[in-house]
Amino acid sequence: MLPVTPDAHGIAVLLLTVVALALFTRDRIPLETSSFIILIILVAGFQIFPYEKDGVPIGPGHFFAGFGNEALIAVCALMMVGKALETTGALHPLASLVGRAWSARPVLALLVTLVAGAILSAFMNNTPIVVLLMPMLVAVSLRVKFPVSGVMLPMGLATIIGGMATTIGTSTNLLVVGISADLGVERFTMFDFVLPVAIVGGVGILFLWIVAPRLIPLRQPPMADTSPRVFSGQLSIKEGGFAAGKTLSEVLAKTNGQIRIDKIQRSESLFLAKLPSIVLQPGDRLFLKDSPENLKHYERELGTTLFNISDDLHPVDDETPLKAEGQQLAEVVVTRGSPLHLRTLAAAQFSNSFGLLPLAIHRARAPSSQVKEELMSIRLRAGDVLLVQGTREAIDRLKAAGTMLVLDGTTDLPQTHHAKRALGVMAFVVFSAALGLLPISVSALIGVGLLLVLGCLSWEDSVSALSTPVILIIVTSIALGTALMDTGMAHYLAGGFVSITSGWPVPIILSAFILILTLLTNVVSNNAAAVIGTPIAISIAHQLGASPEPFVLAVLFGANMSFATPIGYQTNLLILSAGGYKFSDFMRVGIPLTIIMWLGFSIVLPMLYGL
């Protein structure tokens, strides 16, 4: 029997929560937009229809408190610390070590990679770890002929497992620990739940090492072509050819407007303005970039002779093919917070800013589709992959900027002289929190200050490290959780769950709750699932007369098990694109891994907490 009857406000909050979870699953609506809409409705609703709890009005201040929540401050500070490790190259020596291991023993190196990724993820957000390891894995996989598809996905899932181990492993952990402490549960310290994760996660890592690569079909990265697709050339105007004596506009019309001319040279020192009315003469040279097929087509259509850009003596033919002239290909993965996220290439002035030519795009959420036209006007999303071409110097500059994930098949891992300082600051943040000297929010904030003073982090980088979607989803989820608690709806839902499972052993109830959170987190944001699930878990524990700690950990572990879908976690989207995976590949590996982790925690948590 349900303990309370929900009132109108409680029902409205529950309906709004359902709407929020539905909006969070819509790819076409940015996560920050959905979160902001829900926050506005929640605040406006309680303002227009006042509500009191124990004689205290529930107003906007209760819902805006999420912006000052200690867990959110810690999350933001740790994002900045992670950015410093990324931009200073502090973790690159480890990546180089792993790369050398791959060259010697690929199978053993896969285990080393999985364990290293998991351990690192216990102390920092796994996104920069995946960003660091992906280019290295692409390079060594190509070099040792090991299928990259058998490496990328296990690596990404291993970092999610490792992130469960400590309070700072993920933003989800920080939120669950912070909210449970606010609700009266004894605060977890840094390593309080390392043991269950080590036991269960260890089995999960073995599965990813031994079984997972055999479950994944051989996939080719979406843009695995290693030869440049665009070449620079020059067309020499011949006497009697179509272009001789024609205006530039007539030449453009002859090619249906497809030809793109960079410059027109009349003599060694004279270059002509590209005016539509300019009349081309024999001996003029048109400089342009295009595919070999198109360049030869223009040569035939215009009655010209095609030469390499640096060789105007030998026409291009079978004996003198087009030359790449130092051009290289790279793949640029669009990540949240990068200059390309939710923008078009034209708006970002990509070619002018970076000196790179975009060739093609692979859409993350429609892996089979390749967009070939109007590339500059496509609105890019997180996980999309751009194939670009440019000089080694231009690609190096893009990589050094640290604003985008660049996959170019090389093992160049530059390390700055600030790397040791950044590692030292990270060690201070971790150990001061682990030893209980400072709360993680305080130690992380001090760490950011030290990084700024020591020159390891600029204000520009620190601001770019902050993720608007993450901040807004956290604030909105906290607000919804507060509303569920204050209106009694969390207690009501917990009572309903206890009523349905009445007569079941407590370990089975705990197992069922882990499974519910696991299913939810693979559909919506893990932070949303965690923040909404935490007060319900505590209410369930109180109604059962059980210790709340294992139920809080049930939320934490369940909400982190984003294994089965590429939309479950942002690193899954990056891996989906860069590894050439399909949605079903995540299910092939993620569903068995989820079952292993769920059953493992269902056994280990009751044993450790005496349920």
Image: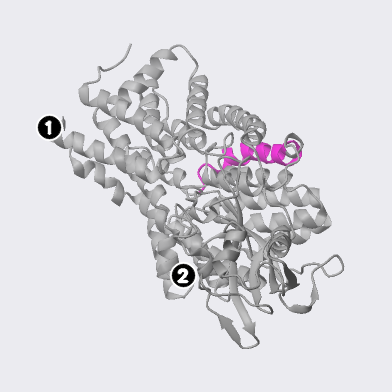
From the image, which quarter does the N terminus lie in?
top left
Front residue (pair 523, 7): 523
> Label 2 neighbourhood size at 10 Å, few (<14), some (14-19), many (20+)?
many
Residue 492 lies, in percent from the top left, at 31, 21
Q: Residue at x 59, y 86 (%)?
A: 270
Front residue (pair 60, 177): 60
Check if mark 1's residue and mark 2's residue have beta carbons within 8 Å.
Answer: no
Q: Which residue is mark 2?
A: 457
For this view, does 60 lie left or right of residue 186? left
The amino acid at mark 2 is Leu
Helix, strand or loop at mark 1: loop
* 458 w.r.t. 530: above or below: below
Q: Is residue 210 magenta?
A: yes
When asked about the image quadrant of residue 131, the answer is: bottom right
Residue 494 lies, in percent from the top left, at 36, 22
Q: Which residues are magenta?
A: 191-212
Q: Residue at x 74, y 40 (%)?
A: 213
Q: State how the image is colored.
A: one colour
For this view, does 383 lie left or right of residue 137? left
Q: Which residue is mark 1?
A: 55
Front residue (pair 253, 218): 253
Instruction: Residue lying at the far bottom in this picture: please name it.
Output: 269
Q: CA distance from mark 1 to mark 2?
A: 48 Å
